[in-house]
Structures are given as C-alpha cells and as structure tokens.
Image (cartoon, rainbow, N blue to C red):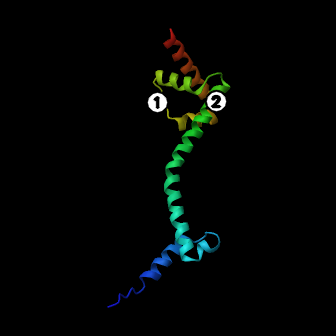
Amino acid sequence: MRVKRGNVLKNRHRKILKFAKGFRGSKSTLFIAANQAVIQSWRNMYRDRRKRKRDFRRLWIARINAACRANGMTYSSFMNGMKKADVLLNRKSLSELAIKDPAAFDGLLKLAKDKLAAAAK
C-alpha cells in the first residue's frame, strides 16, 4: 500500500520559500537553494545574537578607553579606581556618560584617580 502525502510536501516547500522571501536570485524561488539559504541564515542568526553582545561590549570599552586616555589615564586603571571607589556603573552607561556628559565623566575620572592614589599610600 502506498502512502498518500496530500499537501504535506507542498506546505513544507511553501513554508521554506516564505522564509526565503527577499533572498537574491534562485535562493528565493527554488526550494533546494532556498532551503540551504534559510538553514544557513538561521545558523548565522543564532550565532550573531550572541556575538552582538560581545561586539557592543567591545565598543563600550573602546569608547571609555578613548575618553580616559584623553584625560591621561588608561581604561584598566580607571576601572580599577572605579571598583575601589565602589561605583557600580556598567560599561554601557559609562560609555554614554563619556559621550553625552563629559563633565560628569571627568568627575568619575577624578574620583577614580583619588581612590588609586589613596590605595597606593
């Protein structure tokens, strides 16, 4: 006895081609090419959702470092001073402060320098 699949194959193909809408060339029209492209895109999406978090952290650190070096301090010594001063600001908010409110960031730099100097004595 043979198995009658009905609309199963057509529905599966339609679902994949719907996901592939907007892809270039045959990747949006031919099932096999579309299926491979969709699987690859899902793999990239999964990986890049995690990578985005790393990329933003690197960006924030680079911005904080640039603001610190403009005032004669390194990123690592600034973060060490902040930890000793018990300032619990994350890197995202420190980065925003460095860009949008340099006066407040200079105050934090001074606080970190003072704590480092006090710890060195």
Residue at the farthest top position? 121
Spatial CA distance of label 2 from label 1 is 18 Å
Residue 24 image position (x, y, % from top left)? 64, 69
How packed is label 1: few (under 14 Cα within 10 Å), some, or many (20 or more)? few
Give the position of the N terminus as an image quadrant: bottom left
The kind of residue tagged 1 is Leu
- Residue 96 pos. (x, y %): 59, 37
Residue bearing mark 1: 88
Picture quadrant where residue 72 is located: top right
The image position of residue 102, as x and y in percent, is: 64, 30
Q: Is mark 1 on a helix, strand or loop?
A: loop
Are the two marked residues, 2 and 1, in contact with CB atoms closer than 8 angstroms? no
Looking at the image, tell me whether mark 2 or mark 1 is earlier in sequence order. 2
The one nearer the camera, 100 or 9, is 9
- Residue in view at x 60 percent, y 32 percent: 64
Instruction: Please say whether residue 102 is visible from this viewpoint.
Output: no
Residue 105, image quadrant: top right
**Residue at far bottom of view:** 1
Label 2 element class: helix
Q: How crowded is mark 2: few (under 14 residues within 10 Å), some or many (20 or more)?
A: many
Q: Can residue 103 be seen in this view?
A: yes
**Residue at the (52%, 21%) spot, across then down:** 81
**Depicted 16 relative to depicted 50: above or below:** below
Q: Residue furthest front?
A: 1
Q: Residue at x 53, y 26 (%)?
A: 79
Q: Is residue 48 above or below residue 66?
A: below
Establish if 49 lies above or below 116. below
The residue that label 2 is drawn on is: 67
- The residue drawn where x is 64% and y is 30% is 67
Please name whichever residue, 11 or 86, is drawn nearer the observer in this view of the structure. 11
